[in-house]
Image: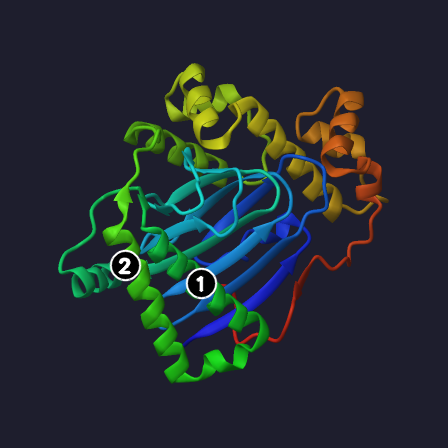
């Protein structure tokens, strides 16, 4: 059944299940007021989303392996997707179940996905054969402009007059146009040479992400991760720089800092201290920790701990026909 929703999220911790088709962890890398504006539409076969994230961030996502997803910038921005630089006018075809993205502030992205067999059927119907295995394609400006305008129109309908998408004939017509233009963009676009790493790079990063997912609430350290993955520190460092825009030590420190923030937000101030939570997560030099925490989150850890627990950090911009996240 078709659905749509529009969300505004002011806490990155609540983004994990908010994005269409995946479990997404967003780690802001600089101080600032976090806001994620997300518009999602689910048609009969096609899913699409548009989102803007206000602050610089590195994110990791585990996606639905049964669907093929494409991503493209809707506004110029500095970003890398799985080690590939995102350029306005290019489409990235996701080929992995675990992906990483690094971006500066005000990242604006559009995404579309179809079940793998549905995409095969659609491409054979439109162009007579299946798509190639290209990772990045650059459609003609006219075709890409058409896709961007259709995608924007669908998002605008979801935001302003969502009820019209409940009409079967409107929903079907818009879905068919989106799928047709998307397939033409992928099929007729020129292959773009990328600096994306080898399959081994992706395999290691997939295992790296799986290891983090298997230990969601634990502080992790580089030595134990390298041992578990069976790779040298130098190797993991190079792959992390490529996919995350930073080395593994900095990434793990950033991750632990966000784990501390989550623990502080959910702790009862009368029963726990900042010192206890910080040391539980491997921060022994408390002075340096407090300075780094304030630089990242814009407040001292004691203020985070004392914040009322019933804060509102996610809001529906309008009533939605979507019962739960898909």
Work out whether 198 lies above or below 69: above
Sequence-wise first label, 1 or 2: 1
x, y percent for residue 16: 55, 51
Work out whether 171 lies above or below 187: below
Q: Nearer the viewer, residue 234 or 134?
A: 134
Q: Which residue is drawn at 69% across and 53% down?
A: 10
The kind of secondary structure element at disc 1 is helix
Query: Farthest residue in the left direction?
Result: 128
Q: Which residue is drawn at 45% across and 16% down?
A: 233
Q: Nearer the viewer, residue 84 or 303?
A: 84
x, y percent for residue 234: 43, 15
Q: Which of 186 and 230 is in front in this view?
A: 186
Q: How far apart are marks 1 and 2 (CA)?
A: 15 Å
x, y percent for residue 44: 36, 73
Q: Which residue is drawn at 57% across and 74% down?
A: 320
Q: Would you say the residues marked 1 and 2 are in contact, meaning their CB atoms lie under 8 Å apart?
A: no
* Residue 9, picture quadrant: bottom right
Q: How crowded is mark 2: few (under 14 residues within 10 Å), some or many (20 or more)?
A: many
Specify whether 271 is left or right of 280: right
Work out whether 141 lies above or below 207: below
Disc 2 designates what residue?
Answer: 183
State the mark number for residue 310: none
Specify whether 266 is left or right of 237: right
The kind of secondary structure element at disc 2 is helix
x, y percent for residue 54: 64, 47
Disc 1 designates what residue?
Answer: 149
Work out whether 171 lies above or below 143: below
Q: Nearer the viewer, residue 8 or 91?
A: 91
Figure label count: 2
């Amino acid at each position: 059944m078709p659905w749509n929703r529009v969300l505004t999220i002011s806490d990155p911790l609540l983004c994990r299940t908010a994005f269409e088709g995946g479990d997404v962890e967003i780690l802001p890398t600089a101080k600032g007021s976090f806001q994620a504006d997300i518009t999602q539409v689910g048609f009969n076969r096609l899913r699409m989303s548009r989102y803007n994230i206000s602050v610089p961030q590195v994110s990791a996502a585990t996606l639905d392996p049964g669907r093929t997803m494409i991503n493209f910038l809707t506004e110029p921005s500095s970003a890398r997707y799985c080690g590939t630089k995102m350029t306005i006018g290019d489409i990235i075809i996701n080929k992995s179940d675990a992906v990483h993205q690094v971006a500066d502030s005000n990242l604006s992205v559009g995404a579309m996905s179809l079940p793998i067999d549905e995409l095969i059927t659609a491409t054979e119907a439109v162009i007579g054969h299946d798509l190639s295995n290209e990772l990045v394609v650059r459609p003609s400006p006219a075709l890409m402009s058409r896709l961007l305008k259709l995608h924007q129109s669908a998002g605008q309908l979801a935001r302003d007059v969502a009820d019209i998408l409940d009409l079967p004939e409107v929903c079907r017509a818009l879905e068919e146009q989106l799928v047709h233009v998307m397939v033409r963009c992928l099929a007729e676009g020129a292959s773009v040479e990328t600096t994306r790493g080898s399959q081994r790079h992706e395999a290691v990063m997939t295992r790296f992400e799986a290891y983090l997912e298997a230990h969601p609430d634990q502080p992790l350290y580089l030595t134990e991760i390298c041992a578990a993955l069976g790779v040298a520190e130098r190797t993991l460092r190079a792959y992390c720089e490529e996919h995350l825009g930073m080395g593994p030590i900095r990434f793990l420190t950033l991750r632990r800092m966000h784990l501390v923030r989550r623990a502080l937000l959910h702790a009862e101030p009368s029963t726990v201290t900042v010192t206890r939570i910080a040391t539980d997560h491997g921060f022994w030099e408390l002075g340096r920790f407090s300075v780094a925490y304030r630089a990242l989150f814009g407040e001292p850890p004691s203020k985070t701990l004392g914040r009322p627990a019933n804060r509102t950090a996610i809001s529906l911009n309008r009533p939605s026909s979507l019962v739960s996240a898909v």
